[in-house]
Image: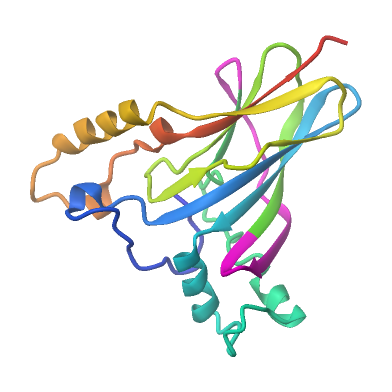
Amino acid sequence: MWRTTFPSVLSVCLAAGPALAHPHVFIDTRIEILLNDRNEATGLRVSWTYDDLYSLYIVGDMGLDPDWDGKLTPDEVARLSGFDMDWIDGFEGDTFALMAGAPLGLSGPRDWTAGYADGKITSTHVRDFAAPVAVAAEPLVVQVYDPGYYVAYAIPFDPVVTGGTGCTAQVFVPDLDAASEALQAALAEYTPDVDLEAEFPAVGANFAEEVRLTCAAP
């Protein structure tokens, strides 16, 4: 789940009934992998484009674009920048990196930006690996998902590789039928008196889209 101290948008249900009340926010994600000249991944630049409704809520709640012309002044852009970067302790940024199935440490966000165009907010931030990650035939995997599935992430953009040589990145999507079946199985375990909004199962990983980066042998 995307977690900051900023207030969350009102619920947007996909269908009737609490069992189908998630997700509430939809984010299109762009992943840029930063490499040094030794084909070691040093960090990620992550871009989030929020859905129209959530963007409208944030712009209105922050008192931006009062004339509703869809354009922000430089001062308003400065105010918007970082609105989603005040992460609570333990939040992993809904971005996860793995090598051979083992999780890799990532720093908190830095160098963030934000903008508003075509009715949508787009923010960017950089996260650094705890140590450079050598990439060859074994792929570096970058997944985007909210464990609690409050936010639905997609990667509709081609991944970007900056630096390095002979490296290729591709997007892979999960089996959505299997993910939906796992969600329904998890929800079936709850009794009717459970508040699903507060106790939603951690099924987000099943819906994770991911980027896989490989590099040719030096």
Residue at point 68%, 64% (across, down): 114
Q: Quadrant of the C terminus?
A: top right
> Is residue 92 found left or right of 175 in the rendered image?
right
Q: Position of residue 167 (x, y in %)?
A: 79, 22
> Is residue 93 found left or right of 151 in the rendered image?
right
- Residue 101 lies in the magenta stretch: yes
Residue at point 73%, 53% (across, down): 110
Q: Position of residue 194 (x, y in %)?
A: 14, 49
Looking at the picture, the colour scheme in use is rainbow
Please identify the residue farthest to the right as the structure is shown. Answer: 37
Locate residue 205: give its quadrant: top left
> Is residue 41 found left or right of 104 in the rendered image?
right
The segment highlighted magenta reads: 99-122
Residue at point 22%, 33% (across, down): 186
Q: Main secondary structure of the magenta part?
A: strand
In the depicted structure, whether residue 58 falls above or below residue 145 = below
Please identify the residue farthest to the bottom as the structure is shown. Answer: 67
Locate residue 131: give its quadrant: top right
Residue at point 17%, 54% (across, down): 17
> Is residue 155 found left or right of 13 in the rendered image?
right
- Residue 133 lies in the magenta stretch: no
Q: Position of residue 154 (x, y in %)?
A: 51, 43
